[in-house]
Image: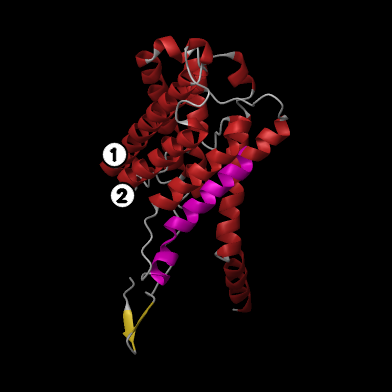
Amino acid sequence: MGKDIEVGGEVQAKDYHDPPPAPLVDAEELTKWSFYRAVIAEFIATLLFLYITVLTVIGYKSQVDTTKGGDDCGGVGILGIAWAFGGMIFILVYCTAGISGGHINPAVTFGLFLARKVSLVRAILYMTAQCLGAICGCGLVKAFQKSYYHQYGGGANSLADGYTTGTGLGAEIIGTFVLVYTVFSATDPKRSARDSHVPVLAPLPIGFAVFMVHLATIPITGTGINPARSFGAAVIFNQDKPWDDHWIFWVGPFIGAAIAAIYYQFILRAGAVKALGSFRSSSAM
């Protein structure tokens, strides 16, 4: 498709053509093993993500519990929790990108579906696998840390005291926008073709985006930006407060993902301008 062309000692960008959009409904995917392999990869990746990160959250809370001999300055702190989330995303996206695309997040899948990068069938199966993986990951945490699990909140997301619902919703929208915008930028094949002399390891900026968003929003919502993460923890913890606030962790990420998809595809990639140009060319004929 594209190749580097050397002119006057300089390497020019590769030729590039946008791939065709994914079909809205692609029933043929259901007949391919590669599709089911990708769904399994999303399930296992989300399970591992929740297992490591929720254990980190619970471990930190137990280490700073002064009533149990803990230390206010002990544990990994918010910085360590943010590193756990960002680091696991980096690892898991790196491991699964070549199999499933490494979504590990229904909001990411939703954004890519809106941009016609995945079909509706794949999007639904991915989201289902991600939610089931999150439930199983939190279930493992509860099984291994039963004495601490309920005592320290089960890693469930909820709106922190002193913050309004609007603030929490806004934090989730903006945080997810940052993440999904980074996903689009880091995985853009046109950018890879144009800037082939600047190699970009896509999982790295995606992991850093998760890390930075957690630093900003842990004090507000505990940081969702991933509906499967919030759903899995809420199902296993199963207490009123996380369920009362749970809608924030679906509505916010989905709105943020939609805005990121529209912004990147139709403004930065000029999709709207291209569509208008095609329409004018057709009309002129």
Q: Which residue is mark 1?
A: 37
Picture coordinates of residue 218, whole percent (x, y): 57, 33
Q: Residue at x 56, y 43 (%)?
A: 176
Q: Are marks 1 and 2 in contact (CB under 8 Å)?
A: no
Is residue 6 inside the magenta stretch? no
- Magenta part of the protein: which range? 172-195
Q: Residue 94 has which mark? A: none
Q: CA distance from mark 1 to mark 2?
A: 11 Å
Note whether residue 115 is visible: no
Q: How is the image coloured?
A: secondary structure
**Residue extending farthest bottom:** 8
Q: Nearer the viewer, residue 28 or 154?
A: 154
The local crowd at label 1, few if under 14, some if 14 to 19, many if 20 or more residues have their Cα within 10 Å, is few
Q: How many numbered marks does the figure carry?
A: 2
The answer to whether 108 is drawn above or below residue 274 in the figure is above
Q: Could you tell me residue 81's position as x and y percent?
A: 47, 33
Q: Which mark is residue 98?
A: 2
Residue depicted at 46% across the width and 20% down the height: 63
Is 59 situated above or below 117? above
Q: Earlier in the sequence, mark 1 or mark 2?
A: 1
Q: Quadrant of the C terminus?
A: bottom right
110, 90: nearer the viewer: 90
Please give the name of the residue rendered at 70% of the width and 35% of the height, measured from the top-left corner.
167
Q: Is residue 180 magenta?
A: yes
**What secondary structure is the stretch in magenta mostly built from?**
helix
In the picture, residue 144 is in which quadrant?
top left
Residue 178 rendering spot, x and y as whole percentages: 56, 48
- For mark 2, give the secondary structure: loop
Query: Observer-nearest residue: 66 or 215?
Result: 66
Among the 4 quarters of the image, the one containing residue 263: bottom right
Frontmost of labels 1 and 2 is: 2
Disc 1, SS: helix
